[in-house]
Image: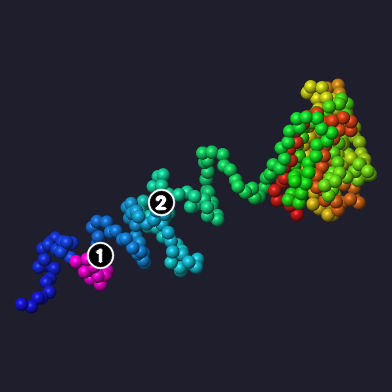
Amino acid sequence: MALSTLGSNAVADDAVTSAKIADDAVTGAKIENSPTIAGNLTVSGSTSLAAVTATGTTTGFASEDKLALNGTDGSATDAGDFLVLNSTDGSANDGENILYEDATGDVNEVLNSSDVSIGTNLTLSAKPKFNLAPEGAGMDLLLDSEITSAVASFEVGSSVINEKYDTYFVTMSMMPASDGVYLYTRGFVNRAEIGAAGNHYGNEKASLSSSTYTNANDSQIWCEYQISAVGNASGEGQSFHGYIQNVNSSTRPCCISGICENASTGGLHNAQVTAGKFDEGNAGDILTGFNFYYNSGNIASGHVRVYGLRGTSI
């Protein structure tokens, strides 16, 4: 008896079970173009899809709720160059959001990209640590040194002052070992102190409370910090903050300027502006360090901080 083809109406629902169909007996050619799958469809191998429409809580695209796109040449027509979402929340914009389940996904996948823009606030649970110095405006702390025992001078060397920055911000506080002394600074060129053997600088300082000032056009001292001698009793000493500029210029003289406060030998408060520069004939000298020292006796104690201003290298 010859077999004939049976119509679908001749087969009762659920009459053909999966156990009655041999493995690999149904090929792709026998599956309609737009089948409806009532349950889950599990694909164990690779799948190439022309388009995917995700509705509801579709899962399984990739680990950690990531959807990997197949972009290759970056053009607008290339597969995977854009991800178009079909918003179902009733908003006016189609494809406005990509939603991730709470506590899933890897945020590092986003933060490791080359350009991340955060439109509102970024809240951190702990103080961040940077393996590289951020670029742009600001300062980098290069030296934070405490003087705990008496020294004849305190030197800031070429490991701090070099070609990386052209402008530095300096703060210091000093207590002299002797009473009635003056604090000075000389610069270093090629890692050697300049000025001890001859005039190299011009400097000036002026009181903030009177017309008293001093000026030297040819001096062995780069910066003189106070007009009145400083005392060394408890609570006396002095502090300074200011800038060093033109460190790496071969045409503009390196200069230092700022404000110093101090207590005189009688405990009277004084404040003055002070500035110094390399002489015009030494404008090409490149600063590689500087020091602090008193005209007599040691520095008993102190604290020095030096910052490099970002974006000032030349």
Residue matched to label 2: 64
Q: Secondary structure at mark 2?
A: helix
Asked whether 158 or 60 is in front, the reply is 158
Which mark is nearer the camera, 2 or 1? 2
Compared with residue 224, is residue 78 higher up or lower down, i.e. above or below?
A: below
- Residue 104: where, in percent of width, then height? 41, 47
Residue matched to label 1: 35
* Residue type at tag 2: Glu
Give the image quarter of residue 160. Answer: top right
Which class describes the residues within 10 Å of circle 2: few (<14), some (14-19), or many (20+)? some
Specify start and end residues of the magenta stretch as a single range: 22-35
Q: Is residue 49 left or right of residue 269?
A: left
Q: Residue at x 41, y 44 (%)?
A: 103
Is residue 269 among the parts visible in the rendering? no
Q: Residue at x 67, y 47 (%)?
A: 137
Q: Residue at x 85, y 39 (%)?
A: 185
The question of residue 33 being in magenta is answered with yes
